[in-house]
Amino acid sequence: MAIDAETVRGWHVNGNGWSDIGYHFFIKRDGTIEEGRSIKKSGAHTKGLNTGSIGVCYAGGVSLDGKTPEDNRTDAQKQALVLLTKAISEVFKGVTFHGHNEFSSKACPSFDVSKENYGKKCEDNPEHLIKAIKEMCK
């Protein structure tokens, strides 16, 4: 099954009773970055830390059994994360990036975010994402 922002939105709205998807951005297996919850609204991604933060989720992070944590990001997802975090850091100066696993007993995102140097490294120009994020903030 292909997982996308609408799939997760359904889980969060219909399954959890939330008003919307908990994340502001969702990255599909092919690297497509989808907008989730409005960036103008607090997310529902890390209990107690949603205000003033931006939630990013990607399809994957578990093995085929659907339970065991596994860093199975595609190359396209890795590149999308680099672009998105660079764009976020350009719009929101001084932002830092963290995994859910730094704040709870969860394994997600199934890799060590601190080792990725997100928001700093980026060979490609994320100008289109910077413009899109700025537009979302209006």
Image: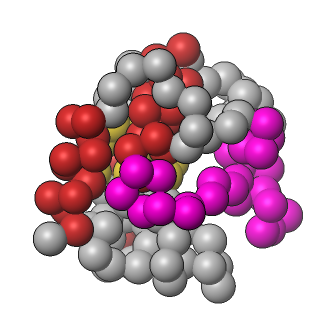
With respect to residue 101, does 59 lie above or below? above
- Against 28, residue 18 (above or below) is below
In the picture, measured across the screen, residue 105 lies left or right of residue 127, that is: right
Secondary structure of the magenta portion, mostly?
A: loop
- With 105 as the anchor, is 135 left or right in this view? left
Q: Is residue 60 above or below residue 17?
A: above
In front of the other: 103 or 70: 103
From what the image shows, is residue 49 above or below residue 73? Answer: below
Residue 110 located within the stretch drawn in magenta: yes
Where does residue 122 sit, x and y in percent of width and height?
50, 27
Quadrant location of the N terminus?
Answer: top left
Residue shown at the point (54%, 14%) measured from the top left? 75
Provide the residue span drawn in magenta: 89-115
Q: Quadrant of residue 9?
A: bottom left
Image coordinates of residue 110 in percent, x first then y, are 75, 39
Image quadrant assignment for residue 95: bottom right
Residue ID at (31%, 67%): 39
| Whether residue 76 is visible | yes
Pick the front one: 130 or 26: 130
**Which image quarter is the C terminus in?**
bottom left
The percent position of residue 134, horizontal first and vertical second, equals 22, 58
Q: Is residue 11 visible?
A: no
In the rendered structure, the answer to whether residue 60 lies left or right of residue 67 reads left
